Image (cartoon, rainbow, N blue to C red):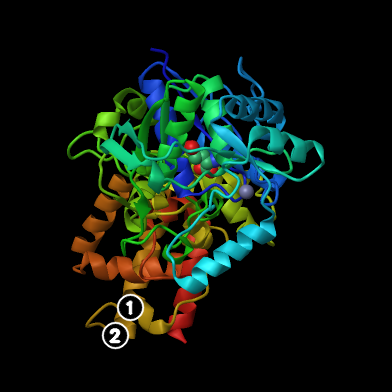
Amino acid sequence: MNIRDRYAPSPTGLQHIGGIRTALFNYLFARSQGGKFLLRLEDTDRSRFDESFVQNLYDTFNWLGIRWDEGPDNGGSFAPYIQSERTEFYKQYAGELLNKGAAYYCFCTSERIEKIRQEREAAHSGESGYDRHCRDIPPEEAARRKVAGENYTIRLKIPLGETTCFHDHLLGDIEWKNDDVNPDPVLLKSDGFPTYHLANVVDDHLMEISHVLRAQEWLSSTPLHVIMYKSFGWTPPEFCHLPMVMGQDGKKLSKRHGATSIDEFRRQGYLPEALLNYIALLGASYEEGRDIFTLSELEQRFSLDKLNKAPAIFDYKKLEWYNGQYIRMKSDAELAALCLPYAQSAGLFGGAGTEPTAQQRDIFTAAMPLIRERLSFLHEAPEKIAYLFSEPALAAAEEFIPKKLDRAAAITLLRLGRELAGPMAKMPDDEQAENFIKEQAEKNAVKLGDLMMPLRVAITGARVSPPLFGSLRILGAERSLQRIDRALQFLEQ
Ligand code: GLU
Ligand code: ZN
């Protein structure tokens, strides 16, 4: 069997976690099976369509590094992959259902439909959907009214009194009484555009889709789709409805929980690898006790049997953890390149937006080992290493004074630190600097921590900072001594 699946978004909003999860699972499934993954734009809801959402879709997948084998931008043998360019097909197939007696013309005005809805609501009847008013209009009469120019839609004629069965890979065998299915929904609207149901089924068939992996919110449409496949005489694809993605409170993930659009995650300094890795685990488990998988590992490991039935809980903390892990895997140069835009707009190299000089760029790259372990997000980088680019504000005097000591002692310690800083700034690695300062602390009978603390505050401006030895090395002897002298002058006042 040729495995073919698809991501079929309606470009009516930004790409968000739920959509990307659907896309990623389809992508991984196709890859794991040596199949094909398609992108199809379901843009038939023209009132909610916006070209910027299409651009957002391309930008998002570009950034994530996920490619489809066939799609609107790269083509394929089933083109076009944009539903608004396929309206002739839908008209043709709606016509086919009419000829088979599996669909019918409906001449109800939207006023009539609305009136029924209101009457039912007032009567608390609990009924919803169309009342099948036009279901039995004789074909000749319908043809006459159509020719006379009456507006019409085409509706599916659901065979009543029957039961529709289908198999869902995750949920098992599902039965649905036809009488409970959305009553005779519209297939072709009065403007000639198809509804989601018609276009989706026709295209999945024409594009030879073998597997439909989609969010569970579409499950209630599936009986309808299966009825349509049967009416056409087509074999339905295999279905697998993916568990919902929930927030920690068990409600469907939404803006209330935090960022949901990929744009937002991107702006916040998440890495695409981290996001993909985490999303791949939303509702699936691959290997006991293992969290980190590269995309190509996931491509090999993915299988429908590894999906969970239970809803997936989106945990922002866990995603943050992933981000930190992927940041740690970056080389200095890679990480610097990723953080640089944030540093530039934060004004690290001059006014906001100023580009770094070659020397600043070198310092920036050299600083990456100092902060790599301390970053959860890329945007945190500039603030953490700002002291390497401009002199930090002088800390308050108390900050320089180690526990149980006084200002005079702090001054003595910082003077000793001043003697050591020059040589340490020239040592090639942390280990050498550390051995050296330890020795000197012992020799001078002071605690290592007490010796380092005022020195750290003088150099970095704070008690808690990136590693001292690396900072001295990057600043160099001269700039380090300037900072120490400034601090001494201040403390000695
Ligand atoms: N256009 C639908 C959506 O926006 C596709 C659902 C499906 O995969 O069938 O998600
Ligand atoms: Zn009607």
Please tell me whether residue 366 is drawn above or below residue 88 in the rendered image: below
In the rendered image, the residue lying farthest to the right is 148
Residue 189: mark in rendering: none
Residue 308, can we see it? yes
Q: Position of residue 55 (x, y in %)?
A: 67, 41
Regarding mark 1 in the picture, which secondary structure is present there?
Answer: helix
Residue 330, can we see it? no
Q: Is residue 467 left or right of residue 338?
A: left
In the rendered image, the residue lying farthest to the top is 1
Query: Depth check: 94 or 2 in front?
Result: 94
Query: Which quarter of the rendering shows the N terminus?
Result: top left
Q: Which residue bears the numbered disc 1?
A: 410
Q: Position of residue 193 (x, y in %)?
A: 69, 39
- Mark 2 burial class by Cα count in 10 Å: few <14, some 14-19, many 20+: few
Q: Position of residue 241 (x, y in %)?
A: 36, 39
Regarding mark 2 in the picture, which secondary structure is present there?
Answer: loop
Label 2 with label 1: CB-CB less than 8 Å: yes
Q: Amino acid at mark 2?
A: Asp
Q: Which residue bears the numbered disc 2?
A: 406
The residue located at (54%, 48%) in the rendering is: 132
- Mark 1 burial class by Cα count in 10 Å: few <14, some 14-19, many 20+: many
Counting every numbered tag in the picture gives 2
Query: Depth check: 484 or 64 in front?
Result: 64
Please tell me whether residue 31 is drawn above or below residue 264 in the rendered image: above
Q: CA distance from mark 2 to mark 1?
A: 6 Å
Q: Is mark 2 within 8 Å of ligand 1?
A: no
Query: Depth check: 486 or 302 in front?
Result: 302
Query: Depth check: 199 or 49 in front?
Result: 199
Q: Amino acid at mark 1?
A: Ala
Q: Position of residue 226 (x, y in %)?
A: 42, 32
Please tell me whether residue 410 is drawn above or below residue 375 in the rendered image: below
Q: Is residue 374 left or right of residue 338?
A: left
